[in-house]
Image (cartoon, rainbow, N blue to C red):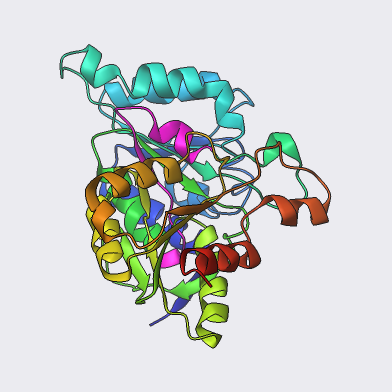
Amino acid sequence: MRIIQFREALREALTEEMRKDESVFLMGEEVAEYNGAYKVSQGMLDEFGDKRVIDTPIAELGFAGIAVGAAMNGLRPVVEFMTFNFSLVAIDQVINSAAKMMSMSGGQFTVPIVFRGPTASAGMLSSQHSQAFENWYANCPGLKVVVPSNPYDAKGLLKSAIRDNDPVIFMESEQMYGDKAEVPEEEYLIPIGVADIKRAGTDVTLVSFGKIIKTCYAAAEELEKEGISAEIIDLRTVRPIDYDCIINSVKKTNRLVIVEEAWPLASISSEITFKVQKEAFDYLDSPILRVTAADVPLPYAPTLIEASLPNPTRIIKAVKQVLYK
């Protein structure tokens, strides 16, 4: 099976869906003439033309609103935010228009739209360009929120997102666009809302999503050297959350550590902790622990970034704590 980059997997998903359905189009800053800020849309302007691959001004609120209107009128826009940090400028359209339109119209309007782009930290970008907003958008009914961790999942999930009749928030990472993995040439879809057990284990369950899955792998490999078997669950989708997958794993391992890049208050890990203690309390042999970003704006210095974000050392420490080691 061929090996391609994360950005190439996204490009294939977009291209295949645009070839299949003329109502699908891409819009955003620098997606056309510049081939995309991260080269996800490279070559797509040449194939589809400027009516379907559209460069926008630096005006997220404006072009998000245009896309919502287009979706309400039968098109399927894919809106690229150069970073989800900039989506805050457009959040009124995302939350108050896209997410609520079907409910407010009594089902007369659907809004089949995908808002996609990178989220969370990407190195020395400091506080205003390093925020993880997965839990913000997952808080809103009417939205689906997808956060893939690898090229294979990214392609299958993006195709499903484009075909979905609800608005989908599709969150990537600048630090993953060059990641490589096997991706089939034949068409495939991955259903939204289904988690994946990336690594089977018996002693502790690690739950995460997005690029932090790689951090969990690193921790699990170190733990294995000490005879500790960690099961890794990749949520892939944080709205809806596949609670059954998590609970079934906890019933086997009896211990749970949740890892995410967001701040701790009102996070995805908070929600999972509540659900597991409610549905599987009797299976837990120790309290659930979380490894999140520090409760501070992300610093600029590399040493402080390392200390602020989830890393293998912090995950290993949490695992040993739930194992009472």
Q: Is residue 304 above or below residue 234?
A: above
Q: Is residue 153 above or below residue 100?
A: below
Q: Is residue 124 above or below residue 62?
A: below
The residue at 47%/39% (across/down) is 267
Q: Position of residue 161 (x, y in %)?
A: 32, 45
- The residues colored magenta run 133-152
Q: Position of residue 19 (x, y in %)?
A: 32, 51
Left or right, 22 with respect to 14, comes to left
Q: Is residue 303 above or below residue 100?
A: below
Q: Was residue 135 drawn as part of the magenta stretch in this picture? A: yes
The residue at 54%/59% (across/down) is 212
The residue at 53%/78% (across/down) is 223
Q: Position of residue 11 (x, y in %)?
A: 46, 56
The residue at 59%/47% (across/down) is 36
Left or right, 246 with respect to 266, comes to left
Query: Between 182 and 62, which is closer to the camera in this rendering?
Result: 182
Which corner quadrant holds the N terminus? Answer: bottom left
Q: Is residue 194 visible?
A: no
Q: Residue furthest left?
A: 107
Q: Position of residue 110 (x, y in %)?
A: 23, 25
